[in-house]
């Protein structure tokens, strides 16, 4: 196309022959040709060409806006006739008002696409039917080697994602004020929603077994300790990748790159997926059972459990109470069996428990209860006491009563132990100085000196998980530890709970 600055006035003085292709506003394709014999071609004389060079969006299918009838745009460019100007006049060619020639051609891609579309029109093949045929249209299209090869190339081409994005969001020319074309946005949105819903349902079915917690093992120690948000997050990322990616993109932010923000986002996504799974089936309750026991021992009320249960975060309050009772019975059986194998002792003390009511009345008011709680300690790695331990203890006490320690004996023991005690005293004083806010131990060059290291323990106790003492809580009773009679009642109560009723035991 050849176009001048003067709004359609073309200078063809040095062009032997020109073919001008254009499309009229009503969509009709036209071709105009001229040679040097026709010195001028005034495009504005043709009313169909008035909108030829208007700015249009890339897609060209937006609703057309009302055309402006104002002709003030053309006041600086008077329309010329072809009777008064000699296009071969050297003075015109050399003048300062020489007209610039701008050549615009169709891109090779557009030419190829138009050629293919014209061929499809000649064979009476619609473009949509062509796409359907390439996309497993019928049995012959599926089995044809050429079609199958081109289909494979298309579906694995990186440009396919860009093409689909343009269908969903058609591009516009930069600076355009017109409304964006709708394109295939409704179709792609409907397909995306249906596809994602179907895929997520399949993922939930695959993850169902891992989100369930059978009643036979749900309150066992191994089940509760193996269930954590970190393990569930890793599991759900593997079993529900599409849903995880979708929720992670909605909850996460590009600025959250530290480990704390990442773990927080993973916890939120894990909770959301577990809530969705629980609403689909109450058997998928692994996280809910764990949270129920946690909130129960944190003192959440029954009303609070009702709210959390309605939000699919926890089990019901009744289930939680029954689960705590089952845990208590299981632990009681465990402590009874271990007390017959390992050394043990019991400690107990007073407890104060406030009893609250939701609606206070004269016959229903809150109160402050006094009771006693007890704990059983069992040391599995300790050597069991001998059968004569009680007799030996009584014999040693009898000897001590006959030969009590004198003041001189106590002073001798103090003098003998002073060197060991002095090392700990010096280290304790140094700790006060080294831990002072005005002193930075990490930057001190002599921080590894032997004088700054803690002294060796005199009689160290064994540490580590294998040496840890086991602790079991007994049932709290409504007996205050206030007198000797109360202590006697409490001892009988603890023995009754442990099943020790025979005096020989």
Image: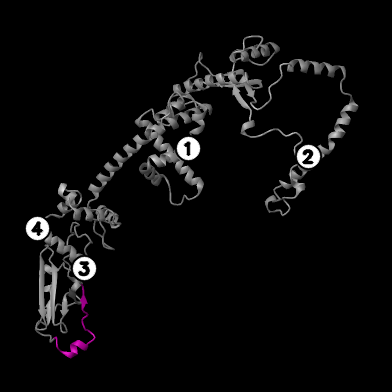
Q: Quadrant of the N terminus?
A: bottom left
Read off the residue under disc 3. 108
Q: Quadrant of residue 203?
A: top left
- Horizontal side of residue 308 vs 344, given as left or right: left
SS for dot 2: helix
- Is 364 drawn above or below residue 179 in the view shown? above
For the image, the number of numbered tags is 4
- Characterize the local packing of mark 2: few (<14), some (14-19) or many (20 or more) Cα atoms within 10 angstroms: some
Residue shown at 13%/64% (left/top)?
25
SS for dot 4: loop
Instruction: Examine the rendering and report whether any part of residue 471 can be seen.
Output: yes
Scheme by which the image is coloured:
one colour
Residue 282 picture location, percent across and down: 38, 28
Residue shown at 10%/59% (left/top)?
121
Q: Nearer the viewer, residue 71 or 61?
A: 61
Marks 3 and 4, the one that precedes in the sequence: 3
Residue 424 picture location, percent across and down: 78, 39
SS for dot 1: helix
Residue 245 picture location, percent across and down: 38, 45
Marks 2 and 1, the one that precedes in the sequence: 1
Nearest to viewer (mark 2 / mark 4): 4
Read off the residue under disc 4. 123
> Start and end of the magenta stretch?
87-104
Instruction: Examine the rendering and report whether any part of residue 294 can be seen.
Output: no
Q: Is residue 101 magenta-colored?
A: yes
- Is 43 drawn above or below residue 446 in the view shown? below
- Characterize the local packing of mark 3: few (<14), some (14-19) or many (20 or more) Cα atoms within 10 angstroms: few
> Alpha-carbon distance for marks 1 and 3?
57 Å
> Alpha-carbon distance for marks 4 and 1?
62 Å
Read off the residue under disc 2. 424
């Amino acid at each position: 196309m050849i176009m001048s600055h003067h709004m359609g006035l073309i200078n063809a003085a040095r062009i032997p022959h020109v073919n001008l292709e254009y499309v009229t506003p009503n969509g009709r394709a036209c071709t105009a040709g001229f040679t040097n014999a026709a010195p001028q071609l005034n495009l504005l004389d043709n009313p169909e060409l008035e909108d030829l060079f208007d700015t249009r969006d890339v897609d060209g299918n937006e609703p057309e806006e009302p055309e402006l009838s104002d002709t003030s745009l053309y006041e600086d460019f008077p329309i010329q006739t072809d009777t008064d100007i000699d296009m071969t006049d050297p003075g015109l060619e050399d003048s300062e008002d020489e007209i610039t020639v701008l050549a615009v051609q169709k891109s090779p891609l557009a030419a190829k696409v138009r050629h293919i579309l014209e061929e499809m029109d000649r064979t009476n093949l619609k473009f949509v039917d062509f796409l359907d045929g390439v996309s497993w249209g019928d049995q012959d299209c599926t089995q044809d080697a050429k079609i199958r090869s081109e289909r494979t190339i298309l579906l694995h081409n990186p440009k396919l994602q860009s093409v689909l994005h343009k269908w969903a969001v058609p591009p516009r020319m930069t600076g355009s004020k017109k409304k964006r074309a709708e394109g295939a946005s409704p179709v792609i949105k409907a397909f995306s929603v249906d596809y994602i819903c179907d895929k997520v349902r399949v993922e939930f079915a695959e993850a169902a077994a891992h989100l369930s917690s059978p009643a036979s093992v749900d309150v066992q120690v191994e089940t509760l300790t193996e269930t954590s948000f970190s393990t569930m997050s890793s599991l759900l990322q593997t079993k529900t990748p599409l849903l995880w990616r979708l929720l992670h993109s909605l909850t996460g932010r590009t600025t959250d790159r530290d480990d704390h923000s990442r773990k927080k986002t993973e916890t939120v996504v894990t909770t959301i997926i577990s809530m969705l799974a629980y609403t689909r089936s109450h058997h998928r309750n692994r996280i809910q059972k764990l949270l129920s026991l946690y909130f129960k021992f944190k003192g959440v009320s029954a009303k609070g459990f009702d709210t959390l249960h309605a939000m699919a975060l926890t089990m019901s309050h009744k289930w939680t109470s029954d689960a705590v009772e089952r845990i208590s019975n299981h632990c009681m059986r465990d402590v009874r069996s271990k007390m017959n194998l390992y050394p043990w002792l019991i400690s107990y003390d007073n407890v104060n428990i406030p009893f609250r009511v939701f609606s206070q009345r004269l016959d229903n008011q809150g109160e402050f209860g006094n009771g006693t709680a007890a704990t059983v300690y069992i040391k599995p790695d300790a050597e069991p006491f001998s059968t004569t331990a009680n007799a030996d203890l009584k014999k040693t006490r009898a000897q001590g009563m006959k030969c009590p320690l004198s003041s001189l004996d106590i002073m001798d023991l103090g003098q003998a132990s002073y060197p060991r005690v002095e090392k700990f005293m010096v280290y304790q004083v140094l700790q006060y100085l080294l831990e002072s806010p005005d002193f930075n131990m990490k930057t001190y060059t002599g921080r590894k000196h032997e004088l700054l290291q803690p002294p060796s323990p005199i009689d160290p106790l064994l540490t580590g998980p294998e040496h840890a003492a086991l602790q079991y809580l007994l049932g709290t009773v409504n007996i205050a530890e206030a007198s000797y009679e109360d202590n006697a009642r409490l001892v009988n109560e603890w023995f009754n709970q442990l099943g020790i009723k025979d005096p020989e035991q």
